[in-house]
Image (cartoon, rainbow, N blue to C red):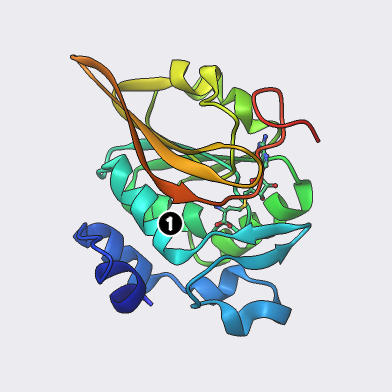
Amino acid sequence: MVTRQIERRGVRDAAVLTAMRAIPRHEFIPERDRHRAYEDHPVPIGSDQTISQPYMVAVMTERLRLHRKSRVLEIGTGSGYQTAVLATLAAEVFTIERLPELSARARMTLTALGYDNIRYRVEDGSVGWPEAAPFDGIIVTAAAPRVPAALVAQLGDPGVLAAPIGSRGSQDLVTISRSEDGDVTTTHFRCSFVPLIGVEGFPD
Ligand code: SAH
């Protein structure tokens, strides 16, 4: 999966590649679709949600430019797979999921795999986690109509935010890189995520 789908498409960050080679992606997928765990597209995880395509996880993680001391905010825990990649690279991960059943399952999987640097919250993540801000990296793994202002406010300096921005059906991967020179917004490529449902997302 990593060699064919990720390295060959240009992801070079050694830490990201090593983490994704080590993490057992199948553990994050319900029994029924587990045989599809390493395929090159999203896979159903129940509750009408999907685990993101491996390549998308790799690219978004690479853009965050994490290091061992980073504190990261993730919106859309889902299966917990992206959370595991973040928690392998960073010091601490704060992850928010609106569906309690998905959050509970992700937490069980991640705890069983030994991750102890993750904090979980069940809530509308489009408003972020203000008490734990600022974050070195913020990743939104559900599609939003615009970059949620609350998340931009919770980004540190330096810091990088990555999110799919667009309509319910199709988005662009957008990053905001904050430095002493200000915020630089970059639009990367088309992508397709399940919608972010919430006050700064789409209506339910
Ligand atoms: N990173 C996850 C992606 C799961 S899909 C993975 O690869 O498994 C996106 C997730 O975002 C879904 O689980 C969905 O329930 C969740 N979500 C949607 N709107 C949300 C919101 N406002 N706050 C938190 N989570 C949200």
Amino acid carrying label 1: it is: Val
- Relative image position of residue 102 (x, y in whole percent): 71, 54
Q: In the rendered image, is residue 116 in sight?
A: no
Position of the N terminus by quadrant: bottom left
For mark 1, give the secondary structure: helix
Residue 194 located left or right of residue 26: right
Position of the C terminus by quadrant: top right
- Relative image position of residue 135 (x, y in whole percent): 39, 28
What residue sits 18% from the left and 14% below the top?
181
Which residue is denoted by mark 1 in the rendering?
57
Asked if residue 180 is positioned above or below residue 197 in the image, the reply reads above
Asked if disc 1 is less than 8 Å from ligand 1, the answer is: yes
What residue sits 40% from the left and 22% below the top?
155
- Relative image position of residue 149 (x, y in whole percent): 52, 17
**As drawn, which residue projects farthest toward the bottom?**
35
Asked if residue 28 is positioned above or below residue 86 in the image, the reply reads below
What residue sits 63% from the left and 80% below the top?
34
Residue 191 located left or right of residue 176: right
